[in-house]
Amino acid sequence: MPASATTALPFKVADLSLAAAGRHQIRLAENEMPGLMALRAEFGDAKPLAGARIAGSLHMTVQTAVLIETLVALGARVRWASCNIFSTQDEAAAAIAVGPTGTPGAPAGVPVFAWKGETLEEYWWCTQQIFDWSAEAAADGADYLGPNLILDDGGDATLLVHKGREFELAGAVPDDAASDSHEYRVILAALRESLAASTDRWTRIASDILGVTEETTTGVHRLYELAKEGGLLFPAINVNDSVTKSKFDNKYGIRHSLPDGLNRATDVLIGGKVAFVAGYGDVGKGAAEALRGQGARVIVSEVDPINALQAAMDGYQVARLESVIDQVDILVTGTGNVNVVTLDHLLGLKHLAVVANVGHFDNEIDMASLEALPGAEKVEIKPQVHEWRLPTGRSILVLSEGRLMNLGNATGHPSFVMSNSFTNQVLAQLELYVSPENYPVGVYVLPKHLDEKVARLHLDALGVELTTLTDEQAAYIGVPVDGPYKVDHYRY
Amino acid sequence: MPASATTALPFKVADLSLAAAGRHQIRLAENEMPGLMALRAEFGDAKPLAGARIAGSLHMTVQTAVLIETLVALGARVRWASCNIFSTQDEAAAAIAVGPTGTPGAPAGVPVFAWKGETLEEYWWCTQQIFDWSAEAAADGADYLGPNLILDDGGDATLLVHKGREFELAGAVPDDAASDSHEYRVILAALRESLAASTDRWTRIASDILGVTEETTTGVHRLYELAKEGGLLFPAINVNDSVTKSKFDNKYGIRHSLPDGLNRATDVLIGGKVAFVAGYGDVGKGAAEALRGQGARVIVSEVDPINALQAAMDGYQVARLESVIDQVDILVTGTGNVNVVTLDHLLGLKHLAVVANVGHFDNEIDMASLEALPGAEKVEIKPQVHEWRLPTGRSILVLSEGRLMNLGNATGHPSFVMSNSFTNQVLAQLELYVSPENYPVGVYVLPKHLDEKVARLHLDALGVELTTLTDEQAAYIGVPVDGPYKVDHYRY
Amino acid sequence: MPASATTALPFKVADLSLAAAGRHQIRLAENEMPGLMALRAEFGDAKPLAGARIAGSLHMTVQTAVLIETLVALGARVRWASCNIFSTQDEAAAAIAVGPTGTPGAPAGVPVFAWKGETLEEYWWCTQQIFDWSAEAAADGADYLGPNLILDDGGDATLLVHKGREFELAGAVPDDAASDSHEYRVILAALRESLAASTDRWTRIASDILGVTEETTTGVHRLYELAKEGGLLFPAINVNDSVTKSKFDNKYGIRHSLPDGLNRATDVLIGGKVAFVAGYGDVGKGAAEALRGQGARVIVSEVDPINALQAAMDGYQVARLESVIDQVDILVTGTGNVNVVTLDHLLGLKHLAVVANVGHFDNEIDMASLEALPGAEKVEIKPQVHEWRLPTGRSILVLSEGRLMNLGNATGHPSFVMSNSFTNQVLAQLELYVSPENYPVGVYVLPKHLDEKVARLHLDALGVELTTLTDEQAAYIGVPVDGPYKVDHYRY
Amino acid sequence: MPASATTALPFKVADLSLAAAGRHQIRLAENEMPGLMALRAEFGDAKPLAGARIAGSLHMTVQTAVLIETLVALGARVRWASCNIFSTQDEAAAAIAVGPTGTPGAPAGVPVFAWKGETLEEYWWCTQQIFDWSAEAAADGADYLGPNLILDDGGDATLLVHKGREFELAGAVPDDAASDSHEYRVILAALRESLAASTDRWTRIASDILGVTEETTTGVHRLYELAKEGGLLFPAINVNDSVTKSKFDNKYGIRHSLPDGLNRATDVLIGGKVAFVAGYGDVGKGAAEALRGQGARVIVSEVDPINALQAAMDGYQVARLESVIDQVDILVTGTGNVNVVTLDHLLGLKHLAVVANVGHFDNEIDMASLEALPGAEKVEIKPQVHEWRLPTGRSILVLSEGRLMNLGNATGHPSFVMSNSFTNQVLAQLELYVSPENYPVGVYVLPKHLDEKVARLHLDALGVELTTLTDEQAAYIGVPVDGPYKVDHYRY
């Protein structure tokens, strides 16, 4: 465990100049995150989150720093870890730890347990730290052990509580099974150590938790599974399926970061090229629009006939990848499915075609088969950009080794997009803390009026004038003047 | 009542040359309605609608003719009326009545009760005729009175059955109330006559009906109200909310027909002009895209902050109409709301600005106040195009008197768009007739796999190649290889 | 010759209600022709064309009516014929003949010799009338015979003067040659009659003419030929190659009228279809943009590698027609070349594909071979829309029999586009009349500052704010503050 | 002078691993520079440049490396310097110096005199080295002093020859004048040293030179001035005004690199923002298209009414900067003019608006006034990105200190764009060397058939199929089947 574990600044790099650089970036990001800043303005005085103890597990980036400081501005106390071993921006972590005043250890600094390039052991140690509120309890003269709210991304923090309590109830942590992944063994080891130290730590922690707000598809999927099995311990709000999350993050985020990543990785002219986009969901729609906007000719593939018809109506050629593979200069996947690009596809591409994935997982492109291909040679052009020399005599350029290239080759979603997601998060935390009576144990999407509120808070920054319904008009369509305006199944 | 009522060709104009012209258009439309033609190919031999007696009430256009002949090809017998007094295309009606062989009275001719420009009395007489299956019953030696299925658009046919039965149960038709509309008085009169002739006609008819498939928002709204009140007599399928209806009809239909209507009405160059689109739902999205595609600068208004944010992210200026009224050359409404364009707006427009509505009802523009304005003068430029000379000294050009200009100034949705809607209709009829056990009394949307089937049937015509999931991929995302592919709340 | 030849209203249809309808349209068109209206405002008091006698030969449309009345407002007297036997809009001709006051024969009425559907004999008779200024000379007590300026479109008026004088000098009109077209024989006959009546009529007319301003490529081509051969009798201004003519008329005019014509002709949904555009010059650029703006997938063909590369960089597939013919739903030609679409192409198209030409001449599509094809059958769907049933069993829809479909199936260029062209015309007339010393015999394009002026006069109507150079900036780039701003070879 | 001056690898960094990295990049760039590679294929055997001695002065980048090796492949010998003190990519220079074999000093290595970050003294020393062919002459046993061709970018190499000869003729180099820039003093010093060493060196060099090919506007402007004054010593080809240079480089290059630079500099979401583009020439057209393609709302300013009208017809709002300054999130200049953005504009922008220049010179934005503003504070966010805190309390983000941000914040034009420019360069060198009889002293643009050839050589890489004229078609439009296809004033 890191030596810094017991200090007030429990992250690897606590350099003040790093914190200062992070502070600069946070200040710039605040300007692009109007939703969060509006919540500070609205609730900063009332501090509705006073008393809230939030355990956060979400990529420790500059944007997350603005989220954290918003939670603090609303009265919450916060402990934070990243939800990915690589995604921490150290300067953001440093700035958050130091706090806005720039004085190390000053009150506003938030305990952060995150650095770029953690081992799995370190990662789960960090995650445990966000549940250890002993210092705060001591300062309060109170006897709680942990947080009363979780803000999660991918469900690891939620998993830890559920598994910890489960094993405490069982009285034992199971032995490692042969099929267990390395990561699961790390978790089991940590919980064995916990169980040895306390037989009811996670049970007590779980009982204090009012609920969790979850950021992503994956985490949401776990929550629905838990709820279906009857194992869910506290209410959960599914932030992922807010319109202002899913339709903005996926479509407009990718529209921005796909060409950004292509350019940083390769400097290849997009104009005039044939770009193939696998999948025409929100991610694919954003990708196709971005590539067309740069003058590429875009071909789309789809398995769902409705999305395929949408692509055709939007003017794109819709074809199977194998039908056009020898024309493709830029190949982009964003389907959410596995092995969408096979080894045969890779072997059929034009010389030095660019292969990039913007789907969530790294298995859209069958990298495993490529790596196992006799005679294939991998040459690093620069970090996250590899030329694969194929036995065919041709080469291809693979970005980020098939992982999310908008993170690996660019800088992920821009702040404005994240502001939408994170404003949903803060509103969801407020719901669980202020109105727990509305949320019996179960999984919820945010009510539509809050989804609309998230959008509303982002309009001024773009100079958007919203029209107001007259009373007559509101009555005519049967909605309140201030919304919500649509039926739940409205598709936007 | 028309003299033709008792003949085999019960419509006003039964001219054979008219029928021949209609047949030409039907043949061209068939090429643009691949979904319907595919159903003929799939089910033409099996004739799964054999025994079905369909009472249809839907605009008697060329596209509807292809729908009717598809129902017939699947084995159904059909009687048809229009659902609007103005919307019949007489050549289409003539062709349907005469039948594909072109011989008047030959078997394939379908009894059609529709002509362009009906009075309200004639309209409701026509609607009654589609429930009078006495001739068919006589031929069959059977004792049914009416249809066993309704295909409805707006709910008038369904209304007639429900009201007829209600008054039969009550034993009397109520007197006209002072607040009753002219149209409702016509209905009451018709039902009084019916009750005098038979005390259980509608009750018996209702008991034979397996269900109704409904085309539009308005009709669907009535059905949900009926179901909520417990008054719904048979199952209903809401075709309107199929994705392949609502997202195609509204968006791609308007994208086509808005500029078409503007051009036919005014011949004004759209390029370089400032166009204002009120509403950024599917209709507004299609309108804005069409106008931008013609080089206009588009400004959008919205009351829903989510849609407003979408408009901004799509690159449009979002403003209140009053803020920019003096810049607007072309004003388009498609909100579904009332008085979106007020008299003040109209008075503030540029000289000879064009005012057009593509929303469903004619009250989006406050025409009543304009008509009542002292000093305003209305000059007909050509049918459906009026210059209003205003007291300000400026004029404006109002299209279709504020009614749906894509119908009034253009020719409505193109066949390909209607093919999507109507393929949903046929599949819905099949569901009710073939699998009635799946549909207890209630209102249903079409199952997603049928929605996907509708899309699927339109792909070949556009040269779209659909990708097929591998078993591995289907398992990975947890869907059948052949779909359905998405959760119900997926937004497309 | 028509009986009306000697009357004050020498056109076929002089119906006052027709004139009133034309007046309506003229008033609406004036709002869309801000360049012409601005010239009236600028020069209406000074009347710089006082004394000018203009013989005009240009399509007698509503837009031309605004042109004529602008010339009159600037002080000119005008006589007018159409330059095409079909292109006259009778209501426009009537309105012009009657004059703005609406009183037949009132002073403002302009002698117009044009009606829709002239014979060739009538056409050339009409053209002669615009050179007969005897009535005006009598009224003036002057001895001139004809005009002192020509405004020409296609060069027929100019041809008549040159040929008339040539034959007078030769003392005889040549006999018809076997190879002479019917039209040329009509011209020779007219000039024989003229020579019989006077041996120096055209010689005297020619000597009075200060110059001609020519509208089109064809006419300009003739002028350059004449000048090269040394036969040009007076200076000529080539209006066709003004930037505000060629880059606006071709690109933005077609962008507007191509989809307009497709819609009026066929009502086929453009979205989702494969559209092929032959030629990527200005016409093709406008066509491709319009089709993409409606959601079509556009494929382009080109012979010039520079234009081909532009098309690729703009994101279009560039292919030879024969390579993709079996995918094409909509085929558009705009190349300026001959037999671009061959019979083989026509036979290879999809069933009921639409074939349309927006190039100047009707030989881009090899209609002759189609008409000669054994087994092909032509069925009129409606005027200017024909289904050709092919021996292959497929049909195609040919618009306007291969002639300019934006004229045949739509209404040609919108007024705003024509305002640019016609403002060039008026400025060119002013140049020749006011500053003849600048124009020795030869062919000129309008000086760049006038080209810029044309653009400038169209900005206010579109709400465009123009930025003004500071003196420092003008000096820095070495141009006057008020322009001209660019070197002659600048490509825009 | 650098110690390396007398070695075989006369650049600062001769590290072999640097050369290897450069070689990787050159290989990737070759795939994106099909025009140059096609010339190698066409002329590599014939070696038409055998005997050519080319002195090159042009940014020593990876793309230029491909240019240099193309010249070598065509038989030329080459010496190279950069034309800008900052623009050398050291790995490209290293790779070129080492040569394709990777063996230092091996024959293919080209003498390169360029490194990133030269002083002005070093810069002009480097430029002199490309004229010193004594080693080559010694090896040849010949008596020439210098090159027989110049390939220039900006005209510095050409200037040196002209000034050197001028002062030799005068017998003296003038004293420094008070108004002389530092750079000019450096030049004078170098030529004084040269004159002291030889009284006819530059005179002899000049007499051997067959001509120069010039890349940029600035250099071309100097050449036309020289020619006008009668001082031009040898023919010059203006590569800058080839269509495949000016219309591609400016429009499509900027379309690519503007959003790339914005993203790398700021990571700010472009979608939904208000972007202002000053200037709607080719650069502005590319910038506006790129920003719209990313979902920004674009406002354009123009001084030329023709370009302004184009912008309006393309659907952009056209406004003066001061009219909309308080709405602008992203401000882009590309006018070629000075002080387009004044201090008042900068003070009026939104908080943290981004200010970026893509015009050639760094004076489009009045940075001098900003730097002199009392109370303004400049904070470096990262290299080439500065926050300026203004006395108004707002900040702005200035990219690349107002210099070309596509170079400073991105990586300049992509290889494919440069391939067009450089293929023009090689063809121009061939013209001067192979057909000098066609080029008496004067300034020429490349003949249109070569401009077309440049385009032609870039089509295959994009999968473009070019259509071939039939003999009939070529005759019809009066051009050879193989082109050139257009009149010189055609605007594309």
Image: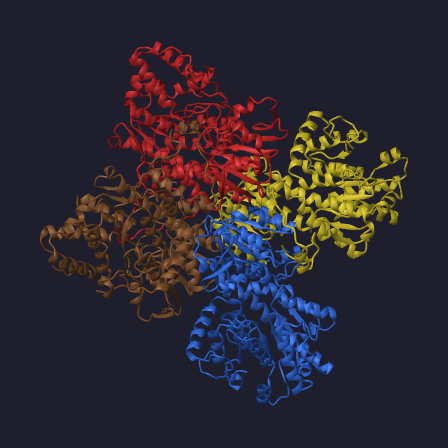
Chain colours: A red, B brown, C blue, D yellow
Q: Position of residue C488 (x, y in %)?
A: 67, 59
Q: Tell me what residue is drawn at x 72 percent, y 36 percent.
A: D119
State whether residue A187 is above or below residue B119: above
Q: Position of residue C85 (x, y in %)?
A: 54, 72
- Going by the image, does B377 lie left or right of D69? left
Q: Position of residue B54 (x, y in %)?
A: 26, 49
- Going by the image, does A279 lie left or right of B341? right
| Residue A141 image-quadrant placement | top left
Q: Quadrant of the N terminus of chain C?
A: bottom right
- Going by the image, does C424 lie left or right of A111? right
State whether residue B443 is above or below residue A229: below
Residue D333 visible, this orientation: no
Q: Quadrant of the C terminus of chain C?
A: bottom right
State whether residue A380 is above or below residue A30: above
State whether residue C370 is above or below residue A488: below
Depth check: give the residue in front, C204 or D250.
C204
Depth check: give the residue in front, B96 or B380.
B96
Residue D220 visible, this orientation: yes
Q: Position of residue D292 (x, y in %)?
A: 51, 47
Total tally of numbered discs in the picture: 0
